[in-house]
Structures are given as C-alpha cells and as structure tokens.
Image (tube, helix red, strand yellow):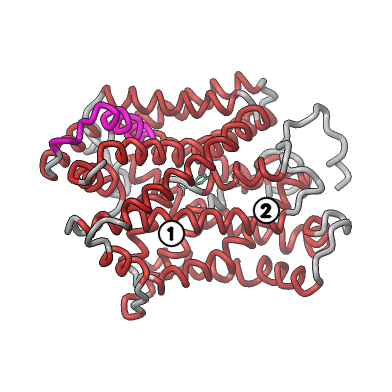
C-alpha cells in the first residue's frame, strides 16, 4: 500500500515469531477456555461438539483471523487507522471503532472476574477452602461478589496489573510477559489434568467430555460452537488487527494463525481434562461460569488429597489466563488512543484505565447494589457480555471478512499470505483461503446472526 512505508514514527513490534505466537495464544486462552468450553462440550454431545467446534474454527475462525492479520499488517496501524489507511475516504474505519468499543465492553466485565480470581487466589494461599461445604462456599461467593468494596478493590488490582504490562509496550511488556507466563500456564494446567484424571472415579468425567452423543446436537449446538469459537479465538474485536500491525513483514501469518487455533483448542481440551474428571469423581453435577470455578471447584479442592496446593495452582492459572487476555484487549484500546488522539503510551494507558475502571465498577456493582438497574432485562454485567460477545464480535467478524475478501481483494490477500511472493504457498491453499474468506465465513456468520435475531 502506498502509505504503509511512510510511518511518522517507528511503531513498536513483536521481536520474534515465537513472541507473536505466545501473545496471540495468551489472548485466545482465557476464561472462555476454562469455565465455558468444558461445560459446553459435555452438554452438547462430547466429541460430537468438539468436531463441530473444530469445523467452525477452520471454516469461520481461521478465515477471520487471517483477514484481521492481513488488515493489521498491511495497514500498519491500530484498529480504526488500519481500515482507514487501506480504504481512504470511506466509512470502513467504523469497523475498527466497533472493535475498540467491543474490547472496552469485554474488558470491563472481564476485569471484574479477573478481580474475583485475584481474591480467590489470595483465599487459596490462606487455605480458606478447607471447611468447604458447598452451601457455605456458595454463600461465601455470593456475599463476596455482591458486596461493594472488596470486589472493586480486586477489580482495581487486576486492571492495574493489566495496565502495568501494557504500559511497558509491545516488545518489552506484552511479548516478554507472555513468553514466561504462557508456558507456565500450560504446565500448570497439564499438571492439574494429570492429578484430576488419576483420581479414583474420574472415568465418567472423561466420558462426559469425549463420548460422542449426536442425539444432543441441536441447532443451539451450532450457535454455541460458533459463538465459543469466536470468543475463544478473540475474533471480531480487532484484537488480531492490532497485534497484526506489530507483526514483521516476513512472518508467516498462515502458520501463526493455525498454531494459535491449535494452542487455544488444545488448552481448552486439557482444561476439560483438568476440571471434569475431578467434578465427576466427587459426584457433583457440572456447571459453568462463576459457579463452576468459584463454588464447585473450591469444594472439590477441599475434599481432594493435596487439594490445597492444587487450588493455589488452579487460581494462578485462572489469573494468568485472564490477564494475558485482558492485556490484549487493553492494547487495542491503548493503540487506538495513541494513534487517533496522538497520545503518549503512558497517557493512553491512564485514560483507558480510568474509563474502563469506571465501567468495571458499574459491572461489579450490578452484582449487588445495582442489581435492579436493568436495560433490555439485563444487568449491566450481562448487558456488556451480550452486546460484545453475542453481537459486536459476530458483526465485526462479518464486516472484517467482507472487507478483506471483497474490498482489499484477491491480489492483496495473496500478497499478504505469501509475504509479497517471497514465501511459497501452494496455489490450492491460497484459493481455498480466499474462498473461505469471501464466501464460507460470511455465510456462516450471516446465518448465525439471522438465527440470533429470530431467537
Ligand atoms: N479469548 C478470551 C477468552 O477465551 O477468554 C476472551 C477475549 C480476549 C475476547 C480478547 C476478545 C479479545 F479481544
């Protein structure tokens, strides 16, 4: 592109391909993998759901991720700027703005949950779950999450940790942090999975996860699989556009995208093996979301030999997973502020922090004193989740593939996929990717959007 080489100031960038991979995997691996994927798998037919999920990752997830990479690396700018540079004089920049808004909404409630993880890590270090009968633990969690000050303090700590990494920059903050934390996160979750699968009576948990049961597959299953694929791979929010703008010209974006998808899916499956066998071994019915990680699991840890130590490792893992994801979302907002309002990184982080902190406080309070404030019948927390995950990410994904496939077009897509012809990619693969970007991914996203509206 004619503007791409005339940058006013040198942009920050990732130093190595491994750095991009761990940062991408860090964004993808998050709460979605730990508290939602295992439950969705079990409820929707085990291996049957995993196959449908993988189908969506390949047919819709990967094309959107590649399209975002293409837009970001080609545009060499943050969310809005990249679209604007590639299509000057048009309104395509709005897609970038929607992505930034989406990240603001997600990080606002994500940071509240990240705060809960911080508090529960603290509790586990103090061996607070030793008297863990389920009713007590349920009351403990609901009185904590609905109170005013402690959750806000925890949300503040979590958001400050996120900001602390982002303020150090892409190479010195995000990349360095992810390089250490992501391998650690994988090691912890593998260790817990081994412990969980070797508990007596863990068999039914593995059956729940992996035995294919096609009778449980309904139209809802497809909706759940696509929604989960999008949220889990952090797509449609311009996160990959932003990270893509920090990726070097010689990086192979096809293998980066597939490696990210493999790492994310593998982590989700290992998380399932860490959680479900233990849940079943203790004869508890599996749930999802906050109840699973803040009530059911602490109860199990209190019953399990070595459970006190496993609890610490589990909450470290949960916190790290949440942190690396929120870092990626904050970077989208910060990069936008730096480029659109010509701010210094530090100022951009402070402004984003304050704004997101206020929204996060509202989310936190909506679990307690503000629980009666409802818009569209939802609390603020649920509303932010709904607008971002069920709406903005899917619309964003649809517009992104249309932009890459039709507006930028074949020549640009092929040029980016082959790094300007220097990296050989078989012609059939290029054509297949273009076909997925132009037809298959938009069709899948459109179908799901229409389905959602009809619901
Ligand atoms: N992928 C994260 C998860 O599975 O929890 C959530 C997420 C991160 C969504 C970053 C969007 C995003 F930009």
CB at disc 2 and ligand 1 closer than 8 Å: no
- The crowd level at tag 2 (other Cα within 10 Å; few <14, some 14-19, many 20+) is many
- Which badge, 2 or 1, comes first in the chain's sequence? 2
User: Which residue is rendered at x = 46% and y = 48% of the image?
Assistant: 388
In the image, taking residue 370 as reference, residue 228 lies left or right, namely right
Residue closest to the eye, 354 or 423? 423
- The crowd level at tag 1 (other Cα within 10 Å; few <14, some 14-19, many 20+) is many
The image position of residue 382, as x and y in percent, is: 33, 45
Question: Which residue was labeled with disc 2?
Answer: 256
Q: Kindly identify which numbered label has been placed on residue 269.
A: 1
What predominant SS class does the magenta segment belong to? helix
- CA distance separating discs 2 and 1: 20 Å
Picture quadrant of residue 439 = bottom right
Residues at marks 2 and 1 touching, judged by CB atoms closer than 8 Å? no
Q: In which quadrant will I find the C terminus?
A: bottom left
Picture quadrant of residue 43 = bottom left
């Amino acid at each position: 592109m004619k503007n791409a080489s005339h940058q006013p100031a040198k942009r920050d960038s990732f130093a190595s391909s491994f750095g991009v991979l761990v940062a991408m995997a860090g964004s993808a691996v998050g709460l979605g993998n730990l508290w939602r994927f295992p439950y969705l798998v079990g409820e929707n037919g085990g291996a049957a759901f995993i196959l449908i999920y993988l189908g969506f990752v390949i047919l819709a997830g990967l094309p959107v991720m590649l399209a975002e990479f293409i837009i970001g690396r080609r545009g060499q700018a943050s969310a809005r700027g990249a679209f604007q540079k590639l299509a000057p004089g048009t309104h395509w920049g709005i897609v970038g703005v929607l992505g930034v808004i989406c990240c603001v909404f997600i990080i606002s409630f994500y940071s509240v949950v990240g705060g809960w993880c911080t508090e529960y890590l603290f509790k586990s270090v103090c061996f607070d779950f030793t008297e863990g009968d389920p009713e007590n633990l349920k009351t403990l969690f609901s009185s904590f999450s609905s109170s005013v000050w402690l959750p806000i303090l925890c949300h503040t700590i979590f958001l400050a940790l996120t900001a602390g990494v982002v303020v150090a920059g892409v190479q010195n903050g995000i990349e360095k942090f992810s390089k250490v934390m992501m391998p650690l996160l994988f090691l912890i979750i593998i260790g817990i999975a081994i412990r969980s699968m070797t508990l007596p009576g863990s068999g039914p948990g593995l059956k729940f996860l992996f035995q294919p049961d096609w009778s449980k597959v309904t139209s809802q299953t497809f909706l759940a699989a696509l929604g989960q694929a999008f949220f889990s791979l952090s797509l449609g929010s311009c996160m990959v556009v932003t990270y893509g703008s920090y990726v070097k010209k010689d990086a192979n974006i096809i293998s980066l995208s597939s490696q990210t998808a493999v790492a994310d899916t593998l982590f989700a499956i290992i998380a399932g093996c860490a959680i479900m066998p233990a849940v079943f071994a203790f004869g508890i019915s599996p749930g999802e979301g906050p109840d699973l990680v803040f009530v059911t699991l602490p109860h199990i840890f209190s019953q399990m030999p070595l459970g006190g130590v496993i609890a610490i490792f589990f909450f470290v893992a949960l916190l790290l997973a949440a942190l690396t994801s929120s870092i990626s979302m904050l970077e989208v907002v910060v990069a936008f502020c730096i480029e659109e309002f010509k701010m210094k990184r530090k100022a951009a982080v402070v402004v984003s922090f304050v704004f997101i902190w206020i929204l996060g406080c509202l989310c936190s309070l909506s679990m307690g004193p503000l629980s009666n404030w409802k818009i569209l019948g939802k609390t603020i927390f649920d509303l932010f989740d709904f607008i971002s995950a069920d709406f903005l990410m899917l619309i964003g994904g649809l517009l992104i593939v249309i932009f890459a496939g039709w507006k930028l077009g074949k020549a640009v897509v092929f040029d980016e996929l082959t790094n300007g012809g220097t990296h050989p990619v078989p012609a059939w693969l290029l054509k297949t990717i273009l076909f997925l970007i132009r037809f298959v991914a938009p069709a899948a996203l459109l179908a799901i959007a229409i389905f959602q509206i009809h619901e």
